[in-house]
Image: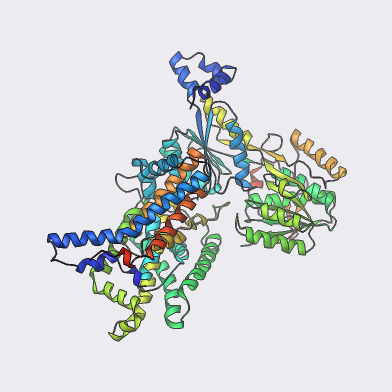
Amino acid sequence: MSSNDLLLPRRRLLAGTALAGASLTLPGALRQALAQAPLVVGVIYVGPRGDFGYNQAQAAAAAALKKMPGIKVVEEENVPETAAVQKTMEAMINQDKATLIFPTSFGYFDPHMLKMAQKYPKVRFAHCGGMWTAGKHPTNTGSYFGYIDECQFLAGVVAGFTSKSKKLGFIAAKPIGQVLRNINAFTLGARLVDPSITTRVIFTGEWSMPVKEAEASTSLIDQGVDVLTSHVDSPKVIVETAEKRGIFSCGYHASQAALAPKGYLTGAEWDWATPYSAQVKAAQTGAPMPNFLRGGLKDGYVKMSPYGKAVSDAAKKKADEIKAAMSKGGYAIFKGALKDNKGNVVIAAGKSLDQFDAELEKMNYLVEGVIGSIPG
Amino acid sequence: MSSAAPAVGLQAAGPGAPGTAAWLRAQLAAAALAAAPAGVALVITVLLFSAAVAAAGFDALEVWGLILSGGFGDAFAWQNTLQRAAPLMLTGLAVALPAQAGRVIIGAEGALVLGGLAAAALGNVLATASPALAWPAMALAGALAGGLWIAIAGLLRDKREVNETISSLLLSFIAIALFNQCVETVLRDPASLNKASTKPLPDALMLPAMPGLDVHWGLGVGVAVALLAWGVLRFTPLGLALKVAGGNPRAALGVGLPVSALTVGACAAGGACAGLAGAVEVAAVHGAANASLIAGYGYSGILIAFAARFSPAGVVPVAILVGGIAASGSLLQRRLGLPDAAVTVLLGFAFVALIGCETLRGRSFWKRKA
């Protein structure tokens, strides 16, 4: 590290961050040490960083951290959910002196991250999607997640305006609550525009299985679907297939607009820079670790891909209107009377579920208008 | 498969009586001769990978420095390496043991997940039993599940002439589907909402780390099984019979060896090793059977066994080498921002060079001048 590298973050720190304010009251030597030793943040991905999906969304937040003063980011991709990730966390702590780690895959939480958190109580572990529970999990661990179904709902609205065949397609990985919630929100958004619209869903059974995803895309397009979206780790092949076959697509996790310049309508994206910087700020100032971070559009945890050129003005107007309501807070996507696709009432008339409602995280049904069933 | 015979072993009948200086010299020369292709392969690998790294705009010396320090530089690096190597020893054996009887089995992944599933299921039944009873039972269940699975491939070959390489691979896909089905339905822990998983084992049944090491007992088990297999092959009539049956089945039948039992048994033994690896992964790492068990260890085992020339003892150092490269790949990513594929390229060069040099063995210029 050259002396310039050392000076730059220090100068920026002294320019007025909270840490600089605190450090001015410290003895000189300690202050210098603080200013010179950056906070080392480790980020671990289960797949490739440039997957146009889940991992890329996390990597974008890591890239945002790199631009913050006094931060050093170390990254590792393609780390399996085995003892290997435990050793990667330990290596970041021992070899890189990381004190804040983002293990970003769901399967890293239990047992891997919990085990390391017990072994290294001074290191902070912030996990994506894990259900951190007070009293059950260590206080040097936490989880962050977002209400991306808000964006799926908006994408559904745009898809509803765009579709001519009134048939939408959804390619889903596994039938877990988060995925069902996205399928349902997308469908509800589209049916808000036109109640005759249906969504055909295919479950691939795997988070990342490009061959099956391509087959499912082809099959749905052959059935007359003209807007395709998904919840898989990397929607790349799905968006590419849609573009090749001349239909429209909505993205997920990160923006896939570059893959489909003609047919990409919009997409539901994570904005992980928000929880990442919250964790970094707490770590830098020594504040207790935020253990449970959740948020939607209003909180900056999720965002929409910019509208593609195929999106009509009417669609933009309606979607922007709802987005504004969501950004104010209190907009309920799931409200009664809501029926599942077997005709059972799942939310009673007059009842409306807040986005934070834990009941939504346990969703186990597909709403009316979804063609398909939950396997298993 | 004749190349399965450990060359060092065959040279043991060289000049001189055991213990004399001449005998020792002959032994050393034989060992050097056996190691020569590996040495040449190492040089080729270093040259190729350095060129690739330099072409990508990185300092080759720095990269090699990080590979050495990340894999083998200090106590932490060694434990990191050994931990990553542990499951690969058993899956390497899963390929190396059937190879002794001339069978090329590549479906260890399926045997591993079924072994893990059996161990997890039994572990939950024995949740209140003492570890002294539960651990051996779980290990046995894992080995049995894996062994029976690969024995199917062995039997199909023996009775129906179905190619065991293909059938073991296809059986592996079936095993994984079966595993997923069980984990997602009958054996699913209802509390595992977002990731289907069997019920977690009680803490008392989790395998601890080995004493003085931050590495779980899978390492000890892997080394022990490898040495046991080596000993059986090297020193027992069974080992000799297996080699004869694998090398020349007709001759073996001629001298009255039970060739079918030997070859199917070797397949079962290999499957048992993979199943045991699955049981260890469940009891030492995951605490339950779930999709994380499908991590590719079974496929890595194929490379390990080929690089070890199917020597059960050779599987141990090769697994450590591969574990070390994986550990250093982690450091390369973090320090230099090299992609994960960098160490895959390195492993690719290493294995191609090793297997390529291996074909030169026995050619005149390898032979010691008389």
Left or right: A113 in relation to A352: left
Left or right: A345 in relation to A19: right
**Total numbered circles:** 0
Locate residue A175: give its quadrant: bottom right
Q: How is this picture coloured?
A: rainbow
Q: Where's the N terminus of chain B, which quadrant?
A: bottom left
B94 shown above or below B345: below
Left or right: A23 in relation to B44: right
A286 shown above or below A209: above
Residue A163's x, y, as percent?
83, 54
Q: Where's the C terminus of chain B, which quadrant?
A: bottom left
Q: Nearer the viewer, residue B73 or B175?
A: B73
Is residue A294 in sight in this rendering?
yes
Is residue B202 in sight in this rendering?
no
Q: Residue at x 53, y 58 (%)?
A: B188
Left or right: B5 in relation to A303: left
Residue B45's x, y, as percent?
42, 53
Q: Residue at x 50, y 13 (%)?
A: A25
Residue A2's x, y, as percent?
49, 25
B27 shown above or below B71: below
Q: Nearer the viewer, residue B22 or A183?
A: B22
Residue furthest right as drawn: A314
Q: Nearer the viewer, residue A25 or B106?
A: B106
Q: Nearer the viewer, residue B117 or A97?
A: A97
Q: Residue at x 64, y 49 (%)?
A: A178
Residue A240's x, y, as percent?
71, 54
